[in-house]
Image: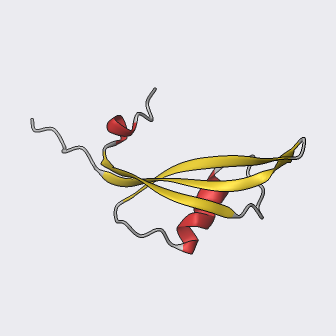
């Protein structure tokens, strides 16, 4: 029996301004993996919706590329 190869994806940290507390901006980040290196407006909107505490109107402030790796390498399991 042969093992399936591990799927690799391009991972990004997408950060948003999620409001403010005590006069300080609250930044929230979402980590997403895609089969390609395209970060479209649709994917940004999907990332925003993936976090229940994220306001629908939260503006994106940065998109950081984390690398091409498997889920295990990204450490989602821990």
Percent position of residue 73, x then y = 33, 37
Whether 75 is drawn above or below 25: the answer is above
Quarter of the figure with residue 38: bottom left
Query: Left or right: where does residue 69 sit relative to residue 53?
Result: left
Can residue 52 be seen in this snapshot? no
Residue at 67% from the left image edge and 47% from the top image edge: 28
As drawn, the residue found furthest toward the right would be: 22
**In front here: 60 or 4?**
60
Tell me how the rendering is colored. secondary structure
Residue at 58% from the left image edge and 49% from the top image edge: 30
Whether 39 is drawn above or below 22: the answer is below
Percent position of residue 3, x then y = 15, 38
**In front here: 54 or 14?**
14
As drawn, the residue found furthest toward the left would be: 1
Percent position of residue 14, x then y = 56, 55
As drawn, the residue found furthest toward the top would be: 78
Residue at 34% from the left image edge and 53% from the top image edge: 9
Query: Left or right: where does residue 41 sit relative to residue 64?
Result: right
Quadrant where the image shows the N terminus: top left
Percent position of residue 51, x then y = 66, 49
Residue at 73% from the left image edge and 55% from the top image edge: 17
Can residue 22 be seen in this snapshot? yes
As drawn, the residue found furthest toward the front would be: 23
Q: How many numbered marks appear?
A: 0
């Amino acid at each position: 029996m042969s093992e399936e190869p591990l799927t690799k994806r391009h991972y990004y940290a997408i950060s948003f301004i999620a409001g403010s507390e005590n006069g300080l901006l609250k930044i929230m980040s979402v980590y997403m993996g895609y089969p390609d290196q395209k970060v479209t407006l649709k994917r940004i909107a999907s990332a925003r919706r993936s976090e229940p505490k994220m306001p629908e109107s939260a503006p994106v402030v940065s998109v950081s590329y984390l690398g091409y790796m498997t889920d295990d390498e990204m450490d989602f399991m821990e």
